[in-house]
Amino acid sequence: MANIHPTAVVDPTAKIADDVEIGAGAVVEGDTEIGPGTVLRPHAVVRRYTVLGSGNLVDSFAVLGGDPQDLKFDPRQVTRLRVGNGNVFREGVTISRGTEAGSETRVGNRTYWMANSHAGHNCDVGDRVIAVNGSLLAGHCTVDAGAILPANGALHQFCWVGAGAFFQGGAQASMHVPPFVLCAGTNRVIGLNSVGLQRVEGLTPAERKQVRDAFRITYQSKLTTGEALARMDGHEEWSGIAVTFRDFVRKVLAAERPYNRGLSPYRKTRTPVSSGL
């Protein structure tokens, strides 16, 4: 039987796995599902239409599945927040559910949300993403696996962030950010996340060179983005992350409104940047 503190408020329609722990003053609304091994610490809140997988930790004063902060949202609509397994949501994290009827916000597996970070409605956050303290994701952002988001920084709505991208504290993006790049300031790619690439298991030296070549062609060849893509398409020998990088650029070029935000430009900086935690 679930271990539920007597002061917690749990709707009888909530589906709670047998070994879930729910702390003092926590709130679980109706039409929710909470998977095995999940812990809700005191005063955590899980709103209606939220689904949590197994082994998640929801810390005090986090609110998961709250109504979208969207003036056109109709609270009578059924929308969802769907969360995978093994995620950590620290103190004060807020994640909104979808805004259009039938839509959802999605969080993958083994993500880590530090204190006071936020994801807006209809965001799609991949596995192992780290949202550092105060990271803010506006609605409809997509963040691919392993990206590290900025402390006290923000992503504009409809932005895409590629796998393994790393943001300096306070960085902001209103344009799309390719995989495994370093970002600083506002819409500024400053280099390649070499440390992140070294941490990718099974990535060969040849494949790392392919990623460096893709970055160089895109950002340091003085070609237009379209010309850079054409040159990258000539490298039929590429595989893995280099192909992912190339396909990301292709997707950005083909994007239609409201996703036609362009590719974050290369602007070299002397500001020291760490590419790992």
Image (cartoon, helix red, strand yellow):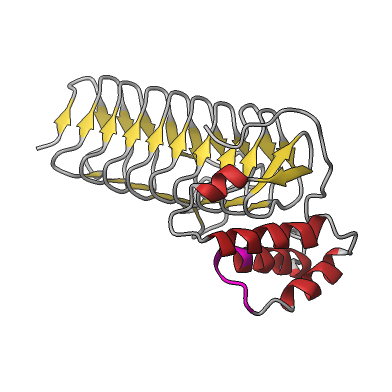
Q: Position of residue 98 (x, y in %)?
A: 53, 51
Q: Quadrant of residue 247?
A: bottom right
Q: Is residue 17 magenta?
A: no
* Residue 238 among those drawn in magenta: yes
In the figure, 107 relative to 26: above or below? below
In percent of width and height, residue 10 lies at 25, 33
Whether residue 239 is visible to the viewer of this picture, yes or no, is: yes
| Image-based side of 258 in relation to 35, left or right | right
Q: Residue at x 68, y 57 (%)?
A: 212
Q: Is residue 146 left or right of residue 224?
A: left
Total number of numbered discs in the rendering: 0
Residue furthest left in the image: 1
Query: In the rendered image, which quarter is residue 56 located in?
Result: top left
Residues rendered magenta in the picture:
237-242
Quadrant containing the N terminus is: top left
Say whether residue 123 is visible: no
* Viewer-nearest residue: 1 or 30: 1
Residue 15: image location, x then y, percent: 23, 46
Direction from residue 224 to residue 113 in the image, left or right: left
Q: x and y percent of residue 28 in the render?
A: 31, 35
Q: Residue pushed farthest front?
A: 205
Which residue appears at 77% of the width and 57% of the height?
216
Tell me which residue sits at (67%, 36%) in the image: 154
